[in-house]
């Protein structure tokens, strides 16, 4: 351990609750815990205690549990005090712990110590934060699979395969006088291709994991009264936005987190796009265009009953929006319940189209499926794990390294260059689980955690 201090923090969320937890970890945790409890603590036993301040006054009735090292979350001596969930009482107990020699924990320091003491690897540590932040059932299940080591297991299997390749290549370099040129017999090339195929499969799964962790920003845009607010309410399944027949009702940006079949979505409603001399409405339009440019996916709504020509290409939509479009744009023709028959819909060029009615619900399931397809979300809830953008970047670098090794082998057959490419592949994979990591990287990762984790 880099830090021999004993740390303390409130491990439960801000606010009032039935139960609040104070957590201690470090060499003095058991001593401080026994002073708080006023009695000796037996390992992994629940003790009903009266927690007192330094003057002897009772602060709370609580359950105190001691977890001696190394069989604890952090690998150090750990004590948890489970009291009533009053913020005032929890702060009082925390101050007593600090007065007895503990210091306040930094964000994520408990998980950081678990990682540094080899209780979990770096991907599992990040999965703790992902589990806490999960906003859909699928994201929570994926984070739990990562925490249980599913993502790490696949990374370690790839690292082992790359290690075996390096051994084979370097052994061939050490015996240059053999009659058989091991680097030219095709076996190394085949094994690199096999590892590359496994890596590609893992990259696809990690891409799904990143969507589970980060979700997408989905923006609704269109002319006034195109049905944006009605669609927002339909997707959110509650009356988030005010809906009237008066054009320009929505004048500011409205946001609502939703679960779109397991995909976490930040749904954003915007002001109707039109020129206006009204300063408030004009500001709403400016904000709408800013949201469009930041979107991961844009739903551009067009009233199907309107007499104006419906746009059919990205260029035509861009003209109506007056802003740069995101990569993914879906044209939504709304209010089809007002038409005598549902119009035939088809994708024109690169622009997918769907017809909906928020009144009858027609087309909404098709729209949800189309959104998932456009962002590439096809997660299997039984096998998906959560991942982060840095994981995907490391996998991309590892893939580039394998490609470089293959090209070097085919072009020159130089074993030393192939071995160096494979070493870099191994390092990039190791960055994901923390086998290779810098202090700066660890600082950025754990700083994003809550204090009590």
Image (tube, helix red, strand yellow):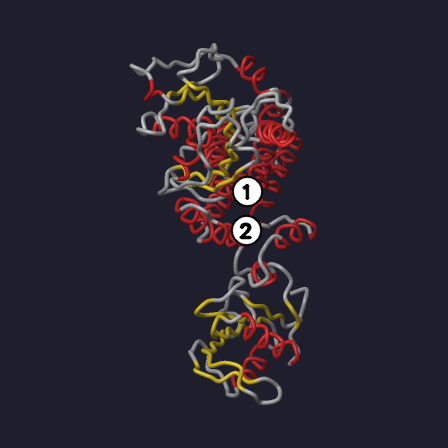
| Quarter containing the N terminus | bottom right
| Quarter containing the C terminus | bottom right
180 left or right, relative to 423: left
For label 1, the SS is loop
For label 2, the SS is helix
> Looking at the picture, how far across and down is residue 56, in whole percent?
58, 89
- 313 above or below 159? above
Picture quarter containing residue 382?
A: top left
Q: Mark 2, residues whose alpha carbon is within 10 Å: few (<14), some, or many (≥20)?
A: many
Label 2 belongs to which residue? 126
Nearer the N terminus, badge 2 or badge 1? 2
295 left or right, relative to 336: right
> Looking at the picture, how far across and down is residue 373, in whole percent?
42, 27
- 32 above or below 152? below
- 108 above or below 386? below
User: Is the C-beta separation of discs 2 and 1 under 8 Å?
Assistant: yes
Q: Residue at x 61, y 75 (%)?
A: 27
Picture quarter containing residue 169?
A: top right
Number of marks in picture? 2
Label 2 and label 1: CA atoms lie apart by 9 Å
Find the residue positioned furthest to the bottom.
56
Q: Mark 1, residues whose alpha carbon is within 10 Å: few (<14), some, or many (≥20)?
A: many
Q: Is residue 177 visible?
A: no
Residue 388, numbered circle: 1
170 left or right, relative to 199: right
For the residue pair 284 and 98, the one nearer the viewer reads as 284
């Amino acid at each position: 351990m880099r830090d021999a201090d004993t740390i303390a923090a409130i491990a439960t969320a801000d606010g009032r609750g039935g139960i609040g937890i104070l957590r201690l970890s470090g060499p003095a945790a058991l001593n401080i815990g026994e002073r708080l409890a006023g009695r000796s603590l037996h390992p992994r036993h629940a003790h009903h205690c009266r927690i007192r301040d330094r003057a002897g006054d009772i602060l709370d009735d609580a359950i105190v549990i001691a977890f001696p090292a190394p069989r604890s979350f952090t690998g150090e001596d750990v004590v948890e005090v489970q009291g009533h969930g009053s913020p005032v009482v929890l702060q009082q107990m925390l101050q007593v712990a600090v007065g007895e020699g503990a210091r306040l924990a930094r964000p994520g320091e408990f998980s950081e110590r678990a990682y540094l003491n080899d209780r979990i690897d770096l991907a599992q540590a990040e999965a703790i934060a992902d589990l806490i932040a999960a906003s859909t059932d699928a994201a929570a299940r994926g984070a739990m699979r990562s925490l249980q080591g599913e993502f790490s297991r696949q990374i370690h299997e790839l690292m082992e395969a790359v290690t075996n390749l390096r051994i084979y290549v370097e052994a061939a370099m050490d015996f240059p006088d053999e009659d058989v040129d091991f680097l030219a017999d095709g076996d190394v090339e085949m094994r690199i291709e096999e590892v590359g195929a496994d890596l590609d499969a893992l990259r696809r799964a990690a891409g799904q994991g990143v969507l589970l962790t980060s979700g997408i920003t989905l923006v609704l845009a269109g002319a006034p009264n195109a049905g944006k607010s009605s669609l927002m309410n339909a997707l959110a399944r509650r009356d988030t936005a005010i809906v009237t027949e008066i054009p320009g009702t929505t004048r500011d940006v409205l946001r609502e987190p939703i679960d779109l079949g397991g995909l976490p979505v930040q749904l954003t409603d915007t002001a109707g796009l039109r020129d206006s001399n009204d300063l408030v409405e004009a500001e709403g339009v400016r904000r709408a265009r800013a949201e469009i440019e930041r979107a991961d996916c844009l739903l551009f709504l067009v009233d199907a009953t309107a007499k104006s020509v419906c746009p059919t290409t990205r260029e035509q939509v861009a003209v109506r929006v007056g802003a740069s479009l995101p990569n993914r744009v879906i044209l939504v023709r709304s209010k089809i319940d007002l038409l005598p028959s549902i119009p035939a819909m088809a994708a024109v060029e690169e622009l997918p189209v769907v017809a909906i009615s928020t009144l009858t619900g027609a087309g909404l399931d098709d729209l949800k499926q189309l959104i998932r397809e456009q962002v590439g979300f096809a997660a299997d809830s039984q096998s998906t794990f959560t991942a982060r953008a840095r994981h995907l970047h490391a996998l991309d670098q590892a893939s580039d390294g394998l490609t470089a090794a293959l090209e070097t082998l085919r072009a020159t057959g130089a074993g030393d260059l192939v071995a160096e490419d494979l070493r870099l592949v191994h390092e990039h994979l190791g960055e994901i689980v923390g086998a290779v990591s810098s202090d700066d990287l660890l600082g950025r990762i754990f700083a994003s955690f809550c204090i009590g984790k």
